């Protein structure tokens, strides 16, 4: 039986939340000023709605029905790993036409982002307010004729890893509860209203992010790791992977490639998604890519090889840098590593956007992740947004959290849902140089 999208979304967010009001058109509307830290209102517990519980059950059933032969992995609602793993048998930058097909319009009836944000804050009313972060104006030229393109990069921390493998010794387990942590993640996304969202460590794509973000006007693609460490955790929700979302009212999908990265000719456990989009306002095309490279000390040469493979794939996709490029990712590499230097010196003519926040415009932030594990405290710069500096300009970038805001117990925390900070940039096209699409 058909379930109302507003009931389904509300059930996926919190099973005791009210329904969401439909809007006449999908897509987020950008606030004119940076979002302020909003105290969360106190709210009395509300009884669970049988209709919402039924809608959540229907959503879970719909996910399971997509792959009747998939094997069970714990007690999560996602049972799609077997079906998804079949996509990994293709070549390294194989095209997937199925991602170019528009989803069923019946399942895309829009919901109000403001009401979804209110629901998140109601669920989080016992937690401290979200951190205040401001955008830094980096414009050096005249205003663009078209609205900027806001890109968000974020390793959101896989739920199975956060609870089962990562050993955040200063983070209370209560702070990692998915029922609330997903609302912190959604609150961060809704507050900054990205046009394009690039995520890593996504292990709740089918039961949370795809259903909700599609109703906010996004089109999404998910590519799981072939041997996700999440699958080693009891009661996992399936494999983690990279996800890429873009607003359909701003962009048209031209092509899409799922890339299983290689290192020294060997297929690896790391993946990337690369999509060519066309701006509906300007008609300009650009490529957006998301990736997550191999972690851990001692794997520097492996990461370097993965980075070279990704650059070669992007060289082909962008027709030798004719198509402007934005690459988002958790590279698991400090700026001193070879893989960083490969990207900085690539013939794709890339620059790292967050260097522009430094006084000299040449230095990366002191950290993009800060955590305490059993092995000790880890503060590193691992996350980047690379862009074609000949074709694109960074108009603004979201400043990072200060050490005081992060606090002595570091990340994640009751205030912040991940051990990595989100990066957000506003881009605009430069005047069209010769030879660019």
Image (cartoon, rainbow, N blue to C red):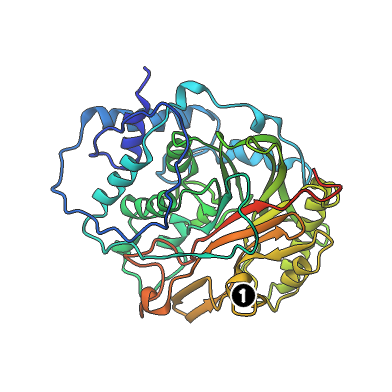
Judged from this view, the residue extending furthest toward the bottom is 376
Q: Position of residue 337 (x, y in %)?
A: 71, 76
Is 368 situated above or below 24? below
Is 399 situated above or below 195? below
Residue 316 shown left or right of residue 74 in the figure: right
Looking at the picture, tell me which residue is in the foreground, 350 or 315: 350
* Residue occupying image coordinates x 86% and y 47%: 435
Q: Is residue 101 visible?
A: yes
Q: Dot 1 corresponds to which residue?
A: 364
Judged from this view, the residue extending furthest toward the front is 142
Looking at the picture, tell me which residue is in the foreground, 211 or 430: 430
- Label 1 CA crowd tier, 10 Å (few <14, some 14–19, many 20+): many
Q: Position of residue 401 (x, y in %)?
A: 44, 71
* Residue occupying image coordinates x 21% and y 32%: 49
Q: Quadrant of residue 417?
A: bottom left
Residue 279 shown left or right of residue 423 in the figure: right
Give SS at disc 1. loop
Residue 314 shown left or right of residue 18 in the figure: right
Looking at the picture, tell me which residue is in the foreground, 82 or 46: 46
Q: Position of residue 405 (x, y in %)?
A: 37, 74
Q: Position of residue 38 (x, y in %)?
A: 29, 58
* Residue occupying image coordinates x 60% and y 62%: 139
Please identify the quadrant where the C terminus is shown.
top right
Residue 164 shown left or right of residue 127 in the figure: right
Q: Quadrant of residue 152?
A: bottom right
* Residue occupying image coordinates x 63% and y 72%: 355
Please identify the quadrant where the N terminus is shown.
top left
Q: Is residue 269 visible?
A: no
Q: Quadrant of residue 350?
A: bottom right
Picture mark count: 1
């Amino acid at each position: 039986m058909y379930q109302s999208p507003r009931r389904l979304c509300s059930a996926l967010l919190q099973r005791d939340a009210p329904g969401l009001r439909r809007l006449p058109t999908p897509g987020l509307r950008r606030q004119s000023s940076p979002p302020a830290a909003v105290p969360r209102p106190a709210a009395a517990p509300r009884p669970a709605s049988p209709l919402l519980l039924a809608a959540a059950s229907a959503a879970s059933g719909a996910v399971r029905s997509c792959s009747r032969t998939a094997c069970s992995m714990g007690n999560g609602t996602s049972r799609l790993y077997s079906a998804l793993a079949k996509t990994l048998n293709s070549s390294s930058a194989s095209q997937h036409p199925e991602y170019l097909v528009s989803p069923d319009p019946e399942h895309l009836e829009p919901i109000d982002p403001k009401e979804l944000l209110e629901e998140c804050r109601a669920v989080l009313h016992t937690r401290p307010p979200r951190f205040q972060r401001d955008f830094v104006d980096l414009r050096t030229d005249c205003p663009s004729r078209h609205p900027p393109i806001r890109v968000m990069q974020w390793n959101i921390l896989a739920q199975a890893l956060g609870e089962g493998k990562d050993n955040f010794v200063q983070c209370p387990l209560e702070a990692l509860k998915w029922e609330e942590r997903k609302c912190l993640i959604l609150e961060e996304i809704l507050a900054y209203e990205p046009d394009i969202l690039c995520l890593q460590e996504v292990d709740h794509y089918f039961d949370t992010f795809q259903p909700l973000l599609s109703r906010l006007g996004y089109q999404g693609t998910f590519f799981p790791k072939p041997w996700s460490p999440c699958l080693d955790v009891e009661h996992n929700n399936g494999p983690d992977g990279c996800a890429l979302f873009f607003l359909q009212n701003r962009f048209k999908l031209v092509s899409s490639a799922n890339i299983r990265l290689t290192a020294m000719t060997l297929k690896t456990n790391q993946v990337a998604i690369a999509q060519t989009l066309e701006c509906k306002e300007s008609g300009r095309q650009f490529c957006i890519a998301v990736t997550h490279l191999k972690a851990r000390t001692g794997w520097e040469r492996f990461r370097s090889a993965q980075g070279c493979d990704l650059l070669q794939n992007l060289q082909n996709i962008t027709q030798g840098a004719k198509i402007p490029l934005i690459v988002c990712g958790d590279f698991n590499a400090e700026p001193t590593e070879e893989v960083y230097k490969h990207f900085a010196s690539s013939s794709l003519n890339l620059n790292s956007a967050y260097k522009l926040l430094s006084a000299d415009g040449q230095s990366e932030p002191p950290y993009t992740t800060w955590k305490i594990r059993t092995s000790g405290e880890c503060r590193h710069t691992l996350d980047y947004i690379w862009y074609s500096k000949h074709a694109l300009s960074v108009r603004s970038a979201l400043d990072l959290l200060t050490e005081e805001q992060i606090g002595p117990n570091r990340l994640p925390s009751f205030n912040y849902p991940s051990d990595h900070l989100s990066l957000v940039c506003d881009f605009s096209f430069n005047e069209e140089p010769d030879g660019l699409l």
